[in-house]
Amino acid sequence: MAVPSGLGKKPVKKDSGKGKGKKRLAGLSRWLHIYLSMVSFTILLFFAVSGLTLNHADWFTSGKEVVTKDSGSVDLKWVNQPDTNKINKLQIVEFFRNKHQVKGALSDFRMDDRELSLTFNGPGYLADSFIDRETGKYELTTTRFGAVAVINDLHKGRDSGKAWSWIIDISAVLMTLVSISGIILICFIKKKRLSGFIIAAVGTLVCYLIYKLFVP
């Protein structure tokens, strides 16, 4: 006896548009979470470690500060100008960069009747110079504060320039995306979803209580 076609076969469920959308969102979240974590691995690790060195400066020492002193003379025409507006600041700055390999950004340039003073700042770095306007003689003091000081200044973005400021901004965006994609991803894992949200809520509550109860 012939069996009618179609009998005994389970009907094939077709994915609805909503189901396909969920799968795509889950796949996209997984892709973002994995690859953004890999792309940002180094910078996130850096900010994690530097946060520890910054918060516990007494645990980590850079060693002694390395102080270097130099002296010399600049061209008297550069500094001995009755009109201070005619003093070529750029020429003086480049002189120190070329002759003494001064690093960092120029953070201060002061002038009075007798003296010029220049200050350069960089991560874990300071250079001060004082120039006598009557003789052109100068003294330069360079201080290097060590590797930990460099790391801490980079963490804070202090004296690190615009390029590093972009790195900080990009790392903040990456951390945000990794966090959001992780939350979205756990929504699609039924066995872990509830426990995951409970752990996230507990972590948030603990941070809030520490702030509320122990922060002055």
Image: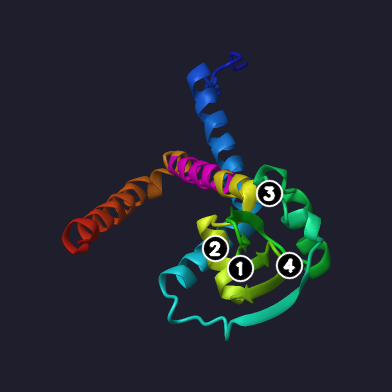
110 vs 155, nearest the viewer: 110
Name the residue: 68% across, 73% down: 139
The percent position of residue 15, horizontal first and vertical second, equals: 54, 21
Count neighbours of disc 4 (C-alpha within 10 A) and say few if under 14, some if 14 to 19, many if 20 or more.
some
Secondary structure at numbered mark 4: loop
The x and y percentages for residue 18 are: 48, 20
Q: Secondary structure at mark 3?
A: loop
Is 180 magenta? The answer is yes
Q: Quadrant of residue 216?
A: bottom left
Instruction: Name the residue carrying label 3.
Output: 82
Name the amino acid, label 1.
Leu
Q: Earlier in the sequence, mark 3 or mark 1?
A: 3
**Image quadrant occupied by the N terminus:** top right
Instruction: Report which residue position mark 2 lands on.
Output: 153
- Dot placed on the residue nearer the N-terminal end, 3 or 4: 3
Q: Is residue 96 above or below residue 192?
A: below
Residue at the extreme bottom of the image, as rendered: 64
Instruction: Read off the magenta span.
Output: 170-183
Residue 68 at x, y = what percent?
Answer: 68, 80
Question: Which residue: 56% across, 74% down?
Answer: 148
Percent x, y of residue 206: 25, 58
Is residue 91 depicted above or below 16 in this figure? below
Give, as a three-letter code, the residue at label 4. Answer: Thr
Give how far apart the Cα atoms at labels 3 and 1 are.
30 Å
